Image (spheres, rainbow, N blue to C red):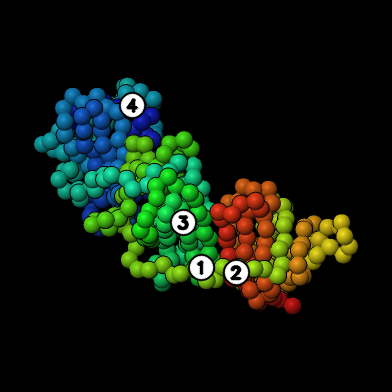
Amino acid sequence: MKVSVLQEQLDKALTILSRAVDSRVTLPVLGNVLFSTEDARLKLAAMNQEVTITTYIGAKVDHAGAITLPAKTLTEMVKTLSPERVDLTLDEGTQTVNLRCGVTTWNVRGIAASEFPPVPETAEPDVVLPGKVLREMIAETVFACAKEDTRPILTGLYLHFDGNVMTVAAADGYRLAVRTAKIDQNFKKMREMVVPAKTMAEVARIIVDDDIPVSITLPGDRELIQFEIENTVVSSQVIDGRFPDFSGIIPKTNNTVVSVYTDDLLKHYKRAEIFARDNNHSARVTARPADSPGAPGEVQISARSNERGDYEGSLEASVEGAPLDTAFNVRYLIDVLSVIPEERILLESNGSNAPGVIRPEGREDFLHLIMPMSVNR
């Protein structure tokens, strides 16, 4: 194998692949990146137990071939190179690649490409949607996935396709995030699957251009889902099991509806978190309607630490319905408020023992439900 590529493109490709390299290597070759020539392109691939990422860069191919090279060594070295052409020449006898960039040259020992597991082939997509839409759908839900694998099904994002609507949802037993979007395709038969949260986070990270479409190939015989973003393909196993039916826990009506500025509320919760850490992250929320017509309502945020003191802050809000006195996990509130770009949010509740529902004001495609905590009197 003898190929030439640009340093900038090689560096970008290795950065994309870096998170797919197996950090707990069971096979030495999985700590490597596969390099193989395809016409006038260089194909690079990395994989772990959950995901395979394949990306392509333009190349001048003098001699076709393939090799795997240690990912960490190569990534660190390429980042130090000047933005020039990089020449790679494989000595098949020693499985060593000589790399040359300007006046810099070095040799890297590899492992034969034949030892690298098969890389999934791409298939015809079932869904195509704008990269901006998918990235936002992931960002507004993935943080609510379970971090512990006591219930593996909750460690993934639930994808649901029905008619011309795509739904993405996440839950960890204490909170639920649901985002929907209209798609061009029309599914006459409902399709659903659960994809590991790490995979979906990688897909969002790779989408850097809002205008580039993302093609999704849904699981078939291979039980793989694939996301194609320009010259990169992410292939992932899906999680076995059935995601809980969450439709029944979303309240249809609410006794209290609070409208408040997103950034102001987020600032208060960040302050409250400093004290809530010592109290199971519990922050109290008290909402009071206006005392007279035309006057603003009020929301109070408070948290207490027996060792460090307490915090109480208030802000003006529109409060419709009954007064509210409840408590939520402050970290969950910070998570959701941090991903909502809208100026105002709605906080809806049926009382202190009922879940709270947060929605961006003016949007019907996203909601976040949080289970209440006991109010510290």
Dot 1, crowdedness within 10 Å: few (<14), some or many (≥20)?
Answer: few
Contact (Cβ within 8 Å) of mark 3 with mark 2: no
Label annotation for residue 6: 4
Mark 4 or mark 2, earlier in chain: 4
Mark 3 or mark 2, earlier in chain: 3
Q: Nearer the viewer, residue 108 or 62?
A: 62
Mark 1 residue type: Ser
Mark 3 residue type: Thr
Mark 2 residue type: Pro
- In x, y percent, where is residue 32? 26, 45
Mark 1 or mark 4, earlier in chain: 4
Quadrant containing the C terminus is bottom right
Q: Nearer the viewer, residue 8 or 100?
A: 8
Q: Which residue is mark 2?
A: 251
Q: Quadrant of residue 157?
A: bottom left
Disc 3 versus disc 4: nearer the observer: 3
